[in-house]
Amino acid sequence: MPTSPAGRPAAGPDPGGDGRDHDAPGPPEAPGPHRSAAAPRRDGAAQGAPVITHLTGSPGRRGGAARRVGTLLAAGIATTLLVTAGCSEGDGGGGNGEQGDRDLAGQSLDWRPCPAPSEAEGGGTAPSPLPGGTAWECSFMEVPRDWAKPGGETIELALIRAKARDQANRIGSLIFNFGGPGGSGVSTLPAAAADFERLRARYDLVSFDPRGVGRSQPVECLDDKELDAYYAQDATPDDSAEEKAYSENLSRYGSACEENSGPDLPYVGTTNAARDMDLMRRVLGDDRLHYFGISYGTELGGVYAHLFPKNVGRAVFDAVVDPTSTAVEGSLGQARGFQLAFTNFAEDCVARGDACQLPGGTPEEIQQFVIDLQNRLEKQPIPGIGDRELTQTQATNGIAQALYSKEYWPLLEQGLDEADGGDGSLLLALSDAMNGRNREGQYSNLQAANAAINCVDFKERYSLDQTKARLPEFRKASPVFGDYLGWGLMGCKHWPVPGQWETPDVSAPGAAPIVVIGNTGDPATPYEGARAMAEALGEGVGVELTYEGEGHGAYNSGNKCVAEAVDRYLLNGKVPASGTVCR
């Protein structure tokens, strides 16, 4: 949950303060499915090919604090520790000039074998064929740069797909957004494909890099060396000198984004991404949009449903962002969510008795141990990876990353124990995973895109004094993460482009049923957001399903009840009873 200029924690699953997974530059919604994330290696890379949301993403999103990840794409699903997919040939960038009256819905996509993902998508190797030999195919689709001028300049969006196994009974395309905002769907879908193989029976699995992300006209801000320094900064200032340095760092970040991507920044928001998806639906030849949104992807799906209710097909929202919460409400919700996840982790450690490596016989004592470690690191960082040290900010970010999934709890326990002994390499590797940094020291554009999308979406701009006034609430909500998330409210203060809304409108009267899944132990997108989304979508549209579990997201948690309910709906059209509870 590094602090993002967007004010949210970075996309890990969904870093951020608006309650989106953010997956922020500070930590999807970067973005990948819940349980497939791999463990980070000591050299700074992740093992395997797991997935945000952004990442955020780091915790959630919303104008001020970090917001949505992973879906960095994240944790959980969320968070993408390492992705390994690619797109098609071409630079994926810039506009193609004036299109006049050209009908973009009639464009023909040139599907080709997928190359290795670009640096902006996270790097790695080209995706391997699926079981049975089905190859991944990639292409680019033209969309208006400015949807207010649909006949004007265009940009290209990178797409990826794997065709359905049963073409005779194919339903259509199932489009995924794994969160962030800022997570590369082109990289994440192949990494997470095993979790969705059942759905490929009757759907072409499709994902994309939204505008501003990966190969789709990526937002660029600081270079790799500058980002190393940016993520190591003190994100919880204690005096006027540190406050000044923090504000100046945010200002420098915003200025770098304006210098390198200024003309694109007004157009990377969620509303434009939703319009892109409807064009994608038409270009793919589908009458309705069949959709699977995770973390920030649920907010994108809600905005789509509001704009195009009659075009909604079978849709599932998992790890749901609360569309009714303001920036402060979303950030506070995320503070409570991460605190709950940390408490559950500490209780589990205590229950294991002597097998627990952390000092303390109660959850409160383990929490105090962690707070003391944070305070020590603020005064004196410890050795991390290579010549990089583990700072307080990076340690907090690494702890948050590990709370996206219960599978990461052993890594968190080990990382905290080693940091207490002076070795910060594991917590730093977790933090790097949240921020999209690979072992070569290269960053994806997850956090840059996260900041750009969050800040153009949300209007709130919190001053230093306004932020400080809210800190007591955040500290009360979370002794471990409150300061970090509270200071994240300043994330968009120096952003060069104004925001669009206070909260998005997701009302969708007349839309087909949308299954909305809430996880009671979700740290990045707290459980309450699912009910709020179901109610906001409207009567007869939002169908709430509860999973009583841990981690960011539910479908890929391994819970059979959730998986079967979703599969029956997407594959057979059987809508689960609203209020269903899976344990």
Image (cartoon, grey):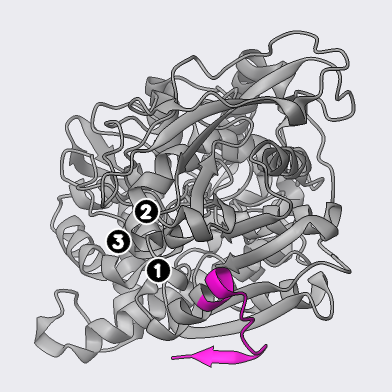
- Of tags 3 and 2, the one toward the viewer is 2
Q: Residue furthest left?
A: 354
Graded by Cα atoms within 10 Å as few (under 14), some (14 to 19) or many (20 or more), the crowding at tag 1 reads: many
* Residue to which mark 3 is pinned: 373
Rounded to the nearest whole Å, what is the CA distance between mark 2 and mark 1? 9 Å
| Mark sitting earlier along the chain (1/3) | 3
Q: Is residue 278 left or right of residue 434?
A: right
Q: Quadrant of residue 381?
A: top left
Q: Residue furthest front?
A: 168
> Dot 1: what SS?
helix
Q: Is residue 506 magenta?
A: no
Graded by Cα atoms within 10 Å as few (under 14), some (14 to 19) or many (20 or more), the crowding at tag 3 reads: some
**Mark 2 and mark 1 residues within 8 Å of each other at the beta carbon:** yes
Q: Quadrant of residue 273?
A: top right
Task: Name the residue nearer the viewer: 367 or 541.
Answer: 541
> Dot 3: what SS?
helix
Tell me which residue sits at (36%, 36%) in the image. 85
Tell me which residue sits at (69%, 10%) in the image. 96
Task: Name the residue nearer the viewer: 10 or 312.
Answer: 312
Residue 115 x, y percent position in the rendering: 35, 25
Q: Which mark is residue 192?
A: 2
Q: Which residues are magenta?
A: 568-583
> Dot 2: what SS?
helix
**What is the three-letter code of the residue carrying label 3?**
Leu
Tell me which residue sits at (74%, 45%) in the image. 274
Residue 439 x, y percent position in the rendering: 23, 33
- Check the picture and name the quadrant holding the C terminus: bottom left
* Residue to which mark 1 is pinned: 556
Rounded to the nearest whole Å, what is the CA distance between mark 3 and mark 2? 34 Å
**What is the three-letter code of the residue carrying label 1?**
Asn
- Of tags 1 and 3, the one toward the viewer is 1
